[in-house]
Image: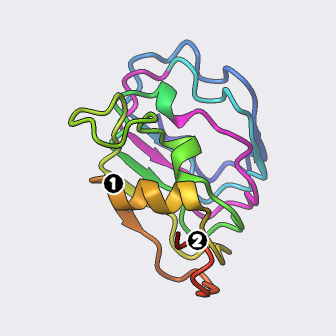
Amino acid sequence: MDISRNKITLINPDTFIHNRELKLLPLQGENITEISKSSFRGLENLEILEISNNNIEELKSLEFHQTFNLKHTNLAQKKIRSFNFELYFSMGSNYDISNPPFQIGYLNVSSNGLTTLDVASMKWLYHTTTVTDLIGNPWNCDCSVLI
């Protein structure tokens, strides 16, 4: 299903609840400013989520982990200023488990407004096997997240 470039501004809760077999969801190039916490509920087979080039500044605790087959997520070239990797792509509280309940393959958060990362995100990045693209953000590197 390709509904990109349709000037969509909001994705409501349960928008895709009846599209359980959907594997690819391209929403790039819209004018999306807000995505509801449960917008992607029901997309258990979703593998690729493309929501780059929108006007999203905050993701408000999206539940990406509800899409257990998600392999590729592109959040590039948005206005996102903060991103808690552990919150959105939780590996659970035990970082030593060999088979986490949810593991994404590729995550692109490049060219946003990220300046720092919280401690939980740093731990997530250290322990994950996810290929994570962070280039093009205006980083403020001051070692404040180091323990």
Report the side of 26 relative to 100 (left or right). right
| Image height of 56 relative to 24, above or below | below
Q: Which residue is mark 1?
A: 127
| Image height of 43 relative to 50, above or below | above
Image point (60%, 53%), residue name: 84
Counting from the top left corner in percent of width and height, residue 52 is at: 56, 60
Counting from the top left corner in percent of width and height, residue 105 is at: 30, 49
Q: Residues within 10 Å of mark 1 (few under 14, many from 20)?
A: few
Image point (33%, 54%), residue name: 127
Name the kind of residue labelled 1 in the image: His
Q: Which residue is mark 2?
A: 145
| Image height of 140 relative to 110, above or below | below
| Segment tinted magenta in the rendering | 43-64
Counting from the top left corner in percent of width and height, residue 31 is at: 74, 56
Q: Residues within 10 Å of mark 2 (few under 14, many from 20)?
A: some
Report the side of 18 relative to 91 (left or right). right
Q: Which mark is residue 42?
A: none
Counting from the top left corner in percent of width and height, residue 51 is at: 56, 52
- Label 2: which secondary element: loop
Report the side of 135 relative to 11 (left or right). left
**Foreground pick, 69 / 29:** 69
Spot the residue most to the front. 147
Magenta span main SS: loop
Q: Distance of mark 1 from mark 2, alpha carbons?
A: 15 Å
Name the kind of residue labelled 2 in the image: Val
Image point (53%, 83%), residue name: 136
Find out whether residue 62 is within the magenta segment.
Answer: yes
